[in-house]
Amino acid sequence: MAFCLLLTACGGKLDRAYDVNSSNPSYTIGAPNKDITARAFAEDLCVVSENISGGLDLSLSEASGLFDISKSTTIVAKNANKVMNPASLTKVMTALLALKYGKLDDTLIASPNVNITESGAQLLKLSEGDKMTLEEALYALLIYSANDVGVLIAEYISGSVEDFALLMTREAHDLGATNTNFKNPHGLTDEEHYTTVYDLYLIFNEAMKYEKFLEIIGCKEHELQYFSAGGQTKTKTITNTNSYLNGGTEVPENVIVIGGKTGTTDAAGSCLILLSNDINANPYISVVLNAGDREQLYEQMSRLLKKEAD
């Protein structure tokens, strides 16, 4: 309780965010200057500590959440802090770091490591030596969910998948997503690769600060262009895996779906994170993890969206 009082006290504010590892005395309960406090970490964020049904049937997925961005309010939460496998929702973090540390017009060159052999993995089928700009790679990553492109981006940013995964986890923790541990850039199954509904909200909320991210996730279709090692042009028309955008699922009335990221593996079930607006253009982030199948995933998400429209 004393900690909460510190974060909500009146008086001046430090010009930097709260840091749990800081030795600055203004972060402590016994701060010598009682009129100066650190800016509360979550002052502009939704928070959640318990289940909130919002009167909805949330039985179609293991975990879910609906977050009102403009009011910094959690409307619905089921197992929002439960550690789970996120499947390709992982790629939101990969894209965030690509936008933060990369340059869109840089050329990425595929190493032999893009040859992913896991059964059922979504692939662009890159070959060693293939070349692609980071911008094109982000389209392939976010709307086509290409796992081999995740490797391409990871090696471009950090030199290896392993080092990139460490960066992903460190940056997630810096955002407050402390129940997250990443082992790869794509979300293919690994027992030590996990996050939560709430942590995904934090990560997606940060990614929304990049206009290119918002542009790509809302793209229904894209004509992808890249080059072989020998310089030959390769093209592929890719369609967004988001069923609300590709016409597979009807959007609830009075809701505008901006975009998001899908994910499906045997371990994670069917998953979706979504940015949408209500009729007054107020933004919401909604998350569904481990629905039984695609049909249940979109039914559960539509229930959240209808709650948003209320």
Image: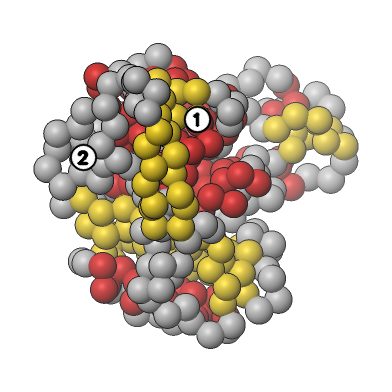
Characterize the local packing of mark 1: few (<14), some (14-19) or many (20 or more) Cα atoms within 10 angstroms: some
Type of the residue with mark 1: Thr
Q: Which colour scheme is used?
A: secondary structure
Disc 2: which residue? 189
Check disc 2 and report its element: helix, strand or loop. Answer: loop
Given this view, does label 1 or label 2 mark the residue nearer the observer? 1
Q: In this view, does 37 lie to the left or right of 288?
A: right
Q: Is residue 34 left or right of residue 5?
A: right
Q: Is residue 156 left or right of residue 268?
A: right
Type of the residue with mark 2: Thr
Residue at the (48%, 81%) spot, across then down: 252
**Which sits earlier in the primary sequence, circle 1 or circle 2?**
1
Where 211 falls versus 100 (above or below)?
below
Disc 1: which residue? 133
22 or 301: which is nearer to us? 301
Total tally of numbered discs in the picture:
2
- Looking at the image, the residue that sits furthest to the left is 119
Where 230 falls versus 124 (above or below)?
above
Looking at the image, can residue 220 be seen?
yes
Where 272 falls versus 29 (above or below)?
below
Residue 288 placement: quadrant: bottom left
Q: In 3D space, how far apart are the residues under numbered discs 1 and 2 (Cα atoms)?
A: 27 Å
Characterize the local packing of mark 2: few (<14), some (14-19) or many (20 or more) Cα atoms within 10 angstroms: some
Q: Percent position (x, y) of residue 22?
A: 63, 21
Residue at the (16%, 52%) spot, across then down: 266
Check disc 1 and report its element: helix, strand or loop. Answer: strand
